[in-house]
Amino acid sequence: MAIDRRTVLNALRAELAFIQSGEYRHPSHAAWRPQFVFEDSPTCLNHNSAAARKPCSECVLASFFPPSAGTQRVPCRFIPLSQSGETIDSLYRTGTRDELESALIQWLNTTIQRLEREEAEDLRSQDHPVIHVEATFTSRQSPDPELSTFSTCANPDCRTPLVYGEGHFFRFRQGRDSGNKAPNTHSVQHLWLCGPCSGRFTLQFREGTGVVIRNRPDVACGVETSRPLSAA
């Protein structure tokens, strides 16, 4: 089962917050016994021991399991945490709790940063590139008439009236087959996100869907947003 990058990123960020908050050392779950990394955190599919056990192949961490761990009952223990091949399993046997947590935090930070870079690169390499233009007009400047074809924030839940000097403009190139355009019409669509919305969201073109509003890949969020613009 393929799991999208955003879901994996959110899970890794949650795991990092879980370990940094000391939950493994001062657990509210099964406090009578030593805690197992990943297995005793909400990241684990089988964290609720009262529920039927689910296969680890459905785990959000499954893409990090090495092929050799396929026959292991707990494959997450064999995720390589360093170039030297340290794993949770090897650190259980030869390391201390501090060494294990330090290696895990380092792996989480490195992996999160790599996935964030990949997501940002995907946005930049779209077939329909998004061009972000800072709104730098002042009250004494005449706005570009081509940018005056919209009047509110593109976020359907916001719709703040356009304020020059705030937020971000987005320009999408329309494909040659994007429909029958009237003579002299522009082949570029312009949209605007207000200051607060541009701090949380970005706009993206998706083939077959059109322009969607989604969470910015460089900003941590508690709720995932990714939906088409009603007007797009």
Image (cartoon, helix red, strand yellow):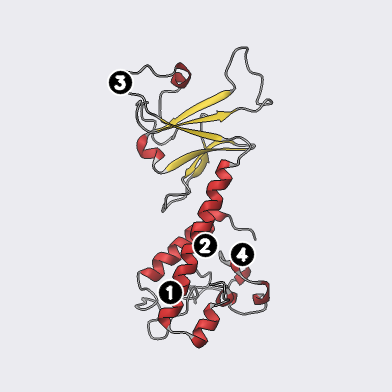
> At x 50% / y 26%, what residue is drawn?
190
Q: Earlier in the sequence, mark 1 or mark 4?
A: 4
Q: For residue 102, which numbered disc appears in the image?
A: 1
Q: Which residue is mark 4?
A: 63
Classify 82 as above or below 116.
Answer: below
Q: Which residue is mark 2?
A: 111
Query: In the rendered view, does 211 fall on the left or right side of 163?
Result: right
Query: In the rendered view, does 4 fall on the left or right side of 132?
Result: right
Mark 4 Cα-neighbour bin, 10 Å: few <14, some 14–19, many ≥20: some
In the rendered structure, which amino acid carries the disc numbered 3?
A: Ser
| Helix, strand or loop under label 2 | helix
Find residue 70 and report its image quarter: bottom right
Classify 225 as above or below 154.
Answer: below
Q: Position of residue 221 (x, y in %)?
A: 41, 52
Whether tag 4 and tag 2 are in contact, CB under 8 A, the answer is no
| Helix, strand or loop under label 4 | helix
Q: Earlier in the sequence, mark 1 or mark 3?
A: 1
In the rendered structure, which amino acid carries the disc numbered 1?
A: Ser
> At x 53% / y 47%, what residue is drawn?
120
